[in-house]
Image (tube, coloured by chain):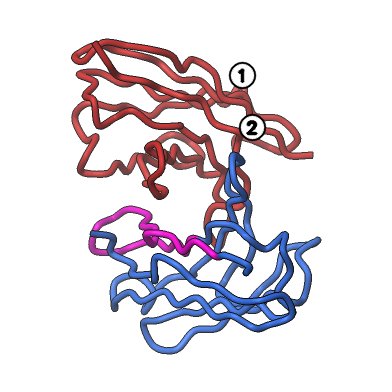
């Protein structure tokens, strides 16, 4: 069974940093593109960043480019999102998600990041 | 404004058929595979349809999908109360080099 479990969310002040983690199990992690997708309170889904299976290619939304960095550890079956210079508008539930040939197929349960002073 | 345009709301009575549209462009729907997601209140999104019209295992055949040019549609027939949820379309956009989501459609079963 595919499982994606996020952790690392919490309350952070504007301008601060946070690192999210996603532990993957139930599939061969090293062969899949992985993603972070977020959802602000009461709003829709917003793609944040994707990383190819080897980690060799990274794609990020303009809204987070230069501030957020996606990475992965294929030995530990883990995905990460390092977030710097956090803003109020980054407040959201952050989902870890797997991509197969047709798009995102599995989602984690999400971790809440709140940016507030 | 989302790159993919969905109606913000839709509604129907039990047993009815409802359709949700997703309008895009040549760099996304016109080129790449589109998925639909269902998000029940307070839960993570779940894959409902992939490659426009393919149902994952466990999704009832009441759900169907289609594509026409740079638009896609999700149809739900025999509407049930448990179908009340938010529905999102999503596809890779070659111009933006990123994945784009529709703004979401809130389906209400009256």
Q: Disc 1 is attached to a residue of which chain?
A: A
Image height of A61 relative to A110, above or below: below
Q: What is the x, y in percent for residue A11?
A: 38, 12
Residue at coordinates 65% horizontally, 78% vertically from top-left?
B64
Does the magenta-highlighted stretch encompass residue A40?
Answer: no
In the figure, is residue B98 to the left or right of B38?
left
In which image quadrant can residue B82 be found? bottom right
- Extent of the magenta region: B88-107
Q: What is the x, y in percent for residue B97?
A: 29, 55
In which image quadrant can residue B107 be found? bottom right
Crowd around label 2: few <14 · some 14–19 · many ≥20 (10 Å): many
Same chain assignment for discs 1 and 2: yes
Q: Earlier in the sequence, mark 1 or mark 2?
A: 2
- SS majority, magenta: strand
Q: Chain B, which colour?
A: blue
Which chain can be seen in red?
A
Residue at coordinates 46% horizontally, 24% vertically from top-left?
A112
Residue receiving disc 1? A76
Residue receiving disc 2? A4
In which image quadrant can residue A25 be found? top right
Report the quarter where the C terminus of chain B lies. Answer: bottom right
Residue at coordinates 68% horizontally, 74% vertically from top-left?
B63
């Amino acid at each position: 069974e595919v499982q994606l479990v996020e952790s690392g969310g919490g309350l952070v002040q504007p301008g601060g940093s946070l690192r999210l983690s996603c532990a993957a199990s139930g599939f061969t992690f090293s062969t899949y593109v992985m993603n972070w997708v977020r959802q602000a309170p009461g709003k829709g889904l917003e793609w944040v960043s994707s990383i190819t299976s080897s980690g060799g290619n990274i794609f990020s939304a303009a809204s987070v480019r230069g501030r957020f960095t996606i990475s992965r550890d294929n030995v530990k079956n883990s995905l990460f999102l390092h977030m710097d210079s956090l803003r109020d508008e980054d407040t959201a539930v952050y989902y870890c998600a797997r991509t197969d040939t047709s798009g995102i197929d599995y989602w984690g349960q999400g971790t809440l990041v709140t940016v507030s002073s | 404004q989302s790159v993919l345009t969905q109606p913000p709301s839709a509604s129907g009575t039990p047993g009815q058929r409802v359709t949700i549209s997703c309008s895009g462009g040549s760099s996304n729907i016109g080129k790449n595979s589109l998925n639909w997601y269902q998000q029940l209140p307070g839960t993570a999104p779940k894959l409902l349809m992939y490659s426009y019209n393919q149902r994952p295992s466990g999704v009832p055949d009441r759900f169907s999908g289609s594509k026409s040019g740079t638009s896609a549609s999700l149809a739900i027939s025999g509407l049930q109360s448990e179908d009340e949820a938010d529905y999102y379309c999503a596809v890779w956009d070659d111009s933006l080099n990123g994945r784009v989501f529709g703004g979401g459609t809130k389906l209400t079963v009256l």
